[in-house]
Image (cartoon, rainbow, N blue to C red):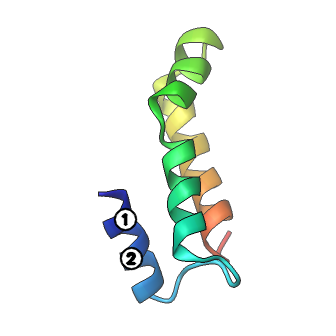
Amino acid sequence: MQRERIEALFKAGRARIGLDKDTATSILWMFTSRDVYHKLVHESGWSSDKFQDWLERTLIESLTDSA
């Protein structure tokens, strides 16, 4: 499913300049891992909404040229 999202990002011409599909997939995989969610929400006390807001901003900043 992540590969499909990355393919759509590149097909739409929205990927960050200089970013290749393999690196983009790795970034998406890392930030959306259960470990990151568990660490921030369960161990650090973030709310699910705070995590979702952070994840959205972080993925946009990491994967696209739009901020």
User: Disc 2 residue type?
Assistant: Glu
**Vertical position of residue 24 compared to residue 50: above or below:** below
**Vertical position of residue 26 compared to residue 66: above or below:** above
What percent of the width, then of the height, locates residue 8?
Answer: 37, 77
Q: Which mark is residue 3?
A: 1
**Vertical position of residue 30 compared to residue 44: above or below:** below
- Residue at 51% across / 54% down in the picture? 28
- The C terminus lies in quadrant: bottom right
What percent of the width, then of the height, locates residue 21?
Answer: 52, 74
Q: CA distance from mark 1 to mark 2?
A: 6 Å
Q: Nearer the viewer, residue 46 or 11?
A: 11
Q: Nearer the viewer, residue 49 or 62?
A: 62
User: Label 2's element?
Assistant: helix
What percent of the width, then of the height, locates residue 31?
Answer: 56, 44
- Residue at 48% across / 36% down in the picture? 33
Mark 2 lies on residue: 7
- Residue at 57% across / 79% down in the picture? 15
Question: Residues at badges 1 and 2 in contact (C-beta under 8 Å)?
Answer: yes
